[in-house]
Amino acid sequence: MTEAATTTAAPGPYGPVFEWPVRVYFEDTDAGGVVYHANYLRFFERARTEWLRAQGWSQERLRTEAQIVFLVANMNLHFKRPARLDDQLLATVEITERKRFSATIAQTLISAEDRSQLIVKAEVQVACVSLVNFRPHLIPDTVIAGARTAA
């Protein structure tokens, strides 16, 4: 499997579901050969970063040009089944709600070989903040498409 992003055909209000391939390496697993629970966060973070890149925004460009960063404000995880060494997975990103200064992102980690196998699902709330003072900053329309909702 090559490391390339894909999107699904049915777009939601903020665009299609973004998918990023993940391979489970030895370093990702615990003594039992199962992905260590904290490493799922790394998989989700990488997928969100690559989703931003697919929108034309690298983390560095956000910092230097827009003078903003996104911080995780809240995250809920639901572990459904374990991922193991050498598994090929897909990490998904879907914006489900956009407010003026924050967004809610639904993420899943599924088997790339059997998409019906859900490994972990997450709901991530991110806040957009200014690098100048780390106070809330309006999310630029060019970062997350779609109409704004109330704060």
Image: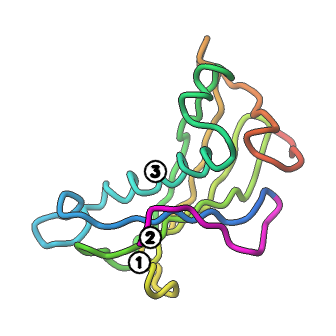
Coloring scheme used = rainbow
Residues at badges 3 and 2 in contact (C-beta under 8 Å)?
no
Name the residue rendered at 75%, 54% in the picture.
97
The three-letter amino acid code for the residue at tag 1 is Lys
| Magenta residue span | 1-13
Indicate which disc residue 80 carries. 1
Q: Secondary structure at mark 1?
A: loop
Q: Quadrant of the N terminus?
A: bottom left
- Tell me the CA gap for discs 3 and 2: 15 Å
Tell me which label, 3 or 2, sits earlier in the chain. 3
Location of the C terminus (image quadrant):
top right
User: Which labelled disc corresponds to residue 110?
Assistant: none
Per the image, the residue denoted by label 3 is 46
Q: Position of residue 52 (x, y in %)?
A: 62, 45
Identity, as a three-letter code, of the amino acid under mark 3: Arg
**Label 2: which residue?**
120
Q: Work out whether mark 2 precedes mark 1 in sequence or the reverse, and give the earlier one.
A: 1
Look at the magenta stretch and give its main secondary structure.
loop
Q: Residue at x 77, y 59 (%)?
A: 15
Q: Amino acid at mark 2?
A: Val
- Magenta stretch holds residue 24: no
- Apparent side of residue 46 relative to residue 16 in the rendered image (left or right): left
Residue at 18% over, 63% down? 26
